[in-house]
Amino acid sequence: MFVRMILAFSAILLLALPLKAQDCQSLNQEGRAEVLRKAPTCDKAVELLSDCAYGASGDILLGQVITQKCEATFLTKLSAGQKRAYDRGMKRCYDKYKNEDGTMYRAMEAGCQVDLAQSYAHKFGKPRSR
């Protein structure tokens, strides 16, 4: 009986996860940004981005929201040299796609910046919640 309850609960969770992604996809841009702002951690916001992303220039705002959330955990802790290195990394993300046409490349630029901010949050930020 206990095993059946666990299997039933697991099935419900598996069915509910895709619905969450569809829920985010049904929101407008500001609604999606609000979902990311309300995420409890940088890592959770990054995880939610895969559900909420457009794959186009709309991801710029979403990437900025997540980048700010991640930066809040580490930016004030960086030395001047670390801050310069972080800024150079952000510029590299921009430079990598600046000559490419199309909204997909703006989304890729935003994703690059989110990845960099998340990696700095892991390295220099507050300990991640478990």
Image (tube, rainbow, N blue to C red):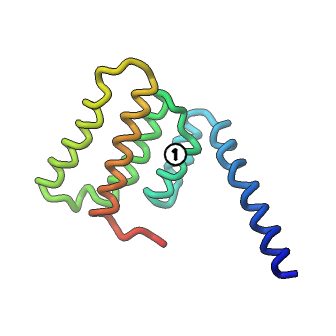
Q: Position of residue 128 (x, y in %)?
A: 41, 68
**How far across and how far down the image is residue 19, in percent?**
72, 48
Front residue of 14 and 33:
14
Residue at far bottom of view? 2
Work out whether residue 113 or residue 31 is closer to the camera in this orientation and state it. 113
Residue visible at 68% across and 43% down in the picture: 23
* Residue 52: x %, y % from top left: 57, 41
Q: From what the image shows, is residue 65 above or below residue 12?
A: above
Residue sitting at x 51%, y 32%: 55
Residue most toward the left? 81
Q: Give the residue drawn at x 56%, y 47%.
A: 35
Say whether residue 101 is left or right of residue 40: left
In the displayed structure, 105 sits above or below 43; it is above
Asked whether, in this view, residue 36 is left or right of residue 77, the answer is right
Q: Is residue 125 left or right of residue 58?
A: left
Question: Alpha-carbon neighbours of circle 1 within 10 Å: few (<14), some, or many (≥20)?
Answer: many
Residue 118 vertical placement versus 90 (above, below): below
Q: How many marks?
A: 1
Q: Which residue is mark 1?
A: 49
Residue 31 image point, x, y percent: 59, 39
Type of the residue with mark 1: Leu
On screen, 127 above or below 101?
Answer: below
Give the structural element (helix, strand or loop) at label 1: helix
Q: Residue at x 41, y 40 (%)?
A: 111
Which quarter of the figure has residue 107? top left
**Which residue is outermost to the right?**
1
Which quarter of the rendered picture does the N terminus lie within?
bottom right
